[in-house]
C-alpha cells in the first residue's frame, strides 16, 4: 500500500491495480480499474535504466491524474529469477501470459542485437497488436518488435550504435538513425535510453492531453518535448581506408575545411576522372563527397561551439560555411537545433575548458585573404 505523510508525501509500494487518491488530510486507496494496462517485459540481463523509466512514467502513483490513470505491471518472458544490470536479481510477479490482456506493452531494451527473440514472445506480441494493443520499444528493444514482422514496410529507430545492426538484421524495416522516436501505426520505437522518456511522455500526451504530459515531465524535471534528435550525439565517423588514393585527400580536407573544395579539385588531387573519384570516395566513406564534406564541417562546428571561445560567425568561416546564416541552415538540417541551442546544451564551463585547439589561419586558407 501507499502511506501518505502530511497530505503530501508517500512512501512504500503501490501494488498493481491500486491508485493513491489525496484528499485533505485523508489517505484513500482507490482501485484503478479503468486506465490502460501498461506492461513492461522482463528478461535475463534486464536493462535497468530502460525499465526504470517505464515504471516511473506508468507505475508511479499520480493522484492528480484521477482514477483513470495507467495501471502498471511487469511480466517475465522467461522463467527463473532474472538478473538485471547493476548487480541485483528480480523475481517477477507475472509470467508472459500477462501480455494477453495488456493495452500497452513496453520492451525496455533487449539482451543484445544478436540475441534471438523467442517465437512465443513474437506470437503473443503479434496477437496483442491484432487486438489493438500498442507496442513500444526503448533502445535495443526495437530488435524484439522488428522480429515480430510488424515493422516490415515501416520506419523504426533505435540507439544510433545499433542502427546498422537493425538494418542488416531486418532489411524490410527502414531505420531512422537520427530521430528520438518513431511510430508505425500502433508500433512505437525510440532511440537510446533517455529518448525512451521522450516517447513515453508523447504516449501520455496522446492518451491524456498536453497538460498531463507537462505534469509528468515537470515531476521528471525534463522538458515535455525535446528539440533535435540523435544527430546531436553521434560520434564523428572515421573513413574506411580501403583506398589509399582517397585517404590522403580525406586527411587534407579535414585539415583544410575552410578551403573551397569543388568536386573537380578533389578528383584532380586524387588523379582520377570525376566519375572514378565519385565511386571510390563513396566506397571509402559511405557517402558522396559533398555530403561527407558538409558533415565534417558540421562536426568541426560542433567541437568549436562546445569549446565556447568563438562566435558563430567566426566558426562558420573556420569550417568553410562562409557565414552564420549558412551554418544555421546546415546545422538545423543535420542536427535539428540551432548552433546557439547546441552551445547552450554542450558547452563546457570556463574552468573545464583549458587550452582549446582552434585552427590557425594558415590551416584554413579561406581566412588568409581577410
Image (spheres, helix red, strand yellow):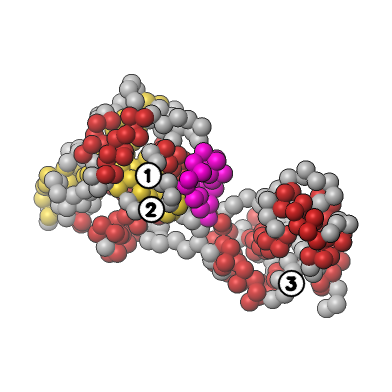
Q: Is the residue 181 above or below the residue 52 in the image?
A: below
Q: Does 122 appear above or below 209?
A: above
Disc 2 packing (10 Å; few <14; some 14–19; many ≥20): some
Q: Are marks 1 and 3 in contact (CB under 8 Å)?
A: no
Across and down, in percent, residue 133 comes to 26, 46
Q: Secondary structure at mark 2?
A: strand
Mark 1: give few (<14), some (14-19) or many (20+) Cα within 10 Å: some
Horizontal placement of 60 versus 234: left or right? left
Q: Residue, x 42% and y 37% (percent of image)? A: 147
Find residue 320 and report its horizontal and vertical position in percent: 74, 69
Q: Report if residue 51 lies within the magenta region.
A: no
What range of the chain is rendered magenta?
158-178
Q: Quadrant of the C terminus?
A: bottom right
List x then y, in percent, for residue 192: 48, 47
For the point 86% across and 73% down, which residue is it? 368
> In percent of the image, x 80 and y 55: which residue is there?
276
Q: Which residue is mark 3?
A: 317
Separation of residues labelled 1 and 3 (CA atoms):
47 Å
Place of residue 298 in the rendered image (x, y in percent of width and height, measured from the top left): 66, 62
Quarter of the image with the N terminus is top left
Q: CA distance from mark 2 to mark 1?
A: 9 Å
User: Which disc is residue 184 wearing?
Assistant: 2
The stretch drawn in magenta includes residue 167:
yes
Residue 5 visible at all: no
Amino acid at each position: 500500500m501507499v502511506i501518505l505523510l502530511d497530505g503530501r508525501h508517500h512512501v512504500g509500494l503501490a501494488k498493481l491495480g491500486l491508485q493513491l487518491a489525496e484528499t485533505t488530510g485523508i489517505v484513500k486507496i482507490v482501485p484503478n480499474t479503468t486506465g490502460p494496462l501498461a506492461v513492461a517485459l522482463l528478461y535475463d540481463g534486464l536493462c535497468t535504466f530502460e525499465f526504470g523509466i517505464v515504471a516511473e512514467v506508468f507505475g508511479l502513483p499520480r493522484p492528480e491524474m484521477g482514477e483513470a490513470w495507467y495501471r502498471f505491471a511487469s511480466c517475465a518472458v522467461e522463467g527463473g529469477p532474472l538478473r538485471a544490470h547493476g548487480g541485483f536479481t528480480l523475481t517477477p510477479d507475472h509470467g508472459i501470459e500477462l501480455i494477453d490482456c495488456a493495452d500497452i506493452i513496453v520492451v525496455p531494451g533487449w539482451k543484445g542485437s544478436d540475441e534471438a527473440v523467442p517465437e512465443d514472445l513474437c506470437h503473443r506480441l503479434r496477437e496483442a497488436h491484432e487486438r489493438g494493443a500498442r507496442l513500444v520499444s526503448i533502445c535495443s528493444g526495437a530488435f524484439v518488435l522488428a522480429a515480430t514482422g510488424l515493422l516490415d514496410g515501416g520506419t523504426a529507430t533505435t540507439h544510433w550504435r545499433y542502427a546498422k545492426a537493425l538494418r542488416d538484421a531486418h532489411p524490410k524495416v527502414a531505420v531512422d538513425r537520427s530521430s528520438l522516436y518513431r511510430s508505425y501505426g500502433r508500433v512505437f520505437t525510440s532511440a537510446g535510453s533517455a529518448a525512451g522518456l521522450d516517447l513515453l511522455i508523447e504516449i501520455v500526451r496522446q492518451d491524456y492531453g498536453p497538460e498531463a504530459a507537462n505534469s509528468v515531465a515537470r515531476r521528471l524535471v525534463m522538458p515535455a518535448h525535446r528539440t533535435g534528435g540523435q544527430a546531436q550525439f553521434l560520434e564523428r565517423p572515421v573513413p574506411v581506408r580501403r583506398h589509399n588514393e582517397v585517404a590522403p585527400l580525406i586527411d587534407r580536407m579535414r585539415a583544410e575545411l575552410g578551403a573551397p573544395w569543388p568536386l573537380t579539385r578533389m578528383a584532380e588531387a586524387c588523379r582520377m576522372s570525376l566519375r572514378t573519384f565519385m565511386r571510390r570516395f563513396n566506397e571509402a566513406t559511405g557517402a558522396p563527397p559533398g555530403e561527407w564534406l558538409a558533415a565534417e564541417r558540421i562536426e568541426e562546428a560542433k567541437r568549436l561551439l562546445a569549446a565556447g571561445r568563438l562566435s558563430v560567425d567566426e566558426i562558420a568561416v573556420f569550417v568553410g560555411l562562409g557565414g552564420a546564416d549558412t551554418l544555421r541552415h546546415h546545422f538545423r538540417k543535420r542536427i535539428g537545433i540551432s548552433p546557439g541551442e547546441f552551445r547552450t546544451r554542450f558547452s563546457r564551463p570556463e574552468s573545464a575548458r583549458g587550452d582549446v585547439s582552434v585552427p590557425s589561419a594558415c590551416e584554413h586558407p579561406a581566412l588568409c585573404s581577410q
